[in-house]
Amino acid sequence: MTDQRAELSWTETGVPVSTRFDDPYYSLGNGLEETQHVFLAGNDLPERFCPGFHIAELGFGTGLNFLTALQAFRAKGCGGVLHFTSFEAFPMARDAQLKALAHYPDLPIAALDGAEDARLTVILGDARTTLPTWGHGADAWFLDGFSPAKNPELWGADLMAEVAGHTAPKGTAATYTAAGFVRRGLEDAGFRVTRAPGYGRKRHMTRAVLPG
């Protein structure tokens, strides 16, 4: 557990910014489109969705990624339950989450408080400590920590190895960053890594597949 809360400022357009890491929680352009491009398409979703599909994430933040994934899961119509586990060291207060999510009223925001077709688990604390003791594996990973240049602890080779160790065979991972040390960490952990077009001003992003 952690008693450390997110420290925030807000842009003029209402995007939350972490003052601890000097980095916005999502794209200043359109956070929803960024999530759809990087984390859904980057993991070949919603095509791969099936009952019981499990997504894991580094950095829960506003909950935008969870809600976007659940919306796509519901639209796929495969039935069953979507499992979503997120590792978060500095949780955002609920009123701040709702303020950030107000930009996207079509998302199933009520699911933050529970839904029959979703099992959301947010594990509080440093992922370098909590992930190694996690007793599950994910079909897809959303690697969404703050910028590797500002939050290198969430992108180190040891943590990428833990991500791989908690990934199902043929599971995937995606992230907005194409930083070389992140790519190498994923490769050393056993992923096949490719560079793909990024969202907005980011020229490239990273996609990874664990051989089955």
Image (spheres, rainbow, N blue to C red):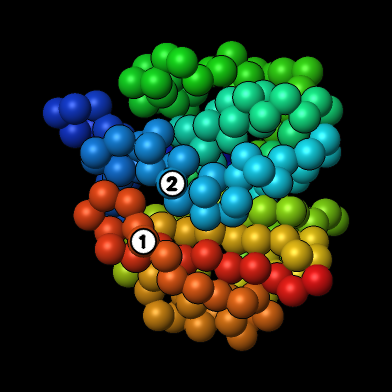
Residue 82: which quarter of the image? top right
Asked if one can make out residue 205 in the rendered structure from this viewpoint, the answer is: yes
The disc placed on residue 82 is none
Residue 206 appears left or right of 193 = left
Residue at the (85%, 56%) spot, across then down: 135
Residue 184 appears left or right of 32 = right
Residue with the most extreme left position: 12
Asked if one can make out residue 63 in the rendered structure from this viewpoint, the answer is: no
Task: Please name the amino acid that badge 2 sits on.
Answer: His
Query: 45 or 186: nearer the eye?
Result: 45
State which tag comes first along the sequence, 1 or 2: 2
Residue 62, compared with residue 149, is above or below; it is: above
Mark 2: which secondary structure?
helix
Residue at mark 2: 37
Task: Please name the amino acid that badge 1 sits on.
Answer: Pro
Could you give the CA–CA distance between mark 1 and mark 2, rounded to whole angstroms? 9 Å
Q: Position of residue 17 (x, y in %)?
A: 29, 41
Query: 199 or 125: nearer the eye?
Result: 199
- Using a 10 Å C-alpha cutoff, classify the residue at mark 1 as few (fewer than 14 neighbours), some (14 to 19) or many (20 or more): some
The disc placed on residue 197 is 1
Mark 1: which secondary structure?
strand
Residue 178, compared with residue 185, is above or below; it is: above
Residue 57 appears left or right of 5 = right
Q: Position of residue 184 (x, y in %)?
A: 51, 83
Residue at the (19%, 33%) spot, across then down: 11
Residue 40, compared with residue 31, is above or below; it is: below
Residue 100, compared with residue 171, is above or below; it is: above
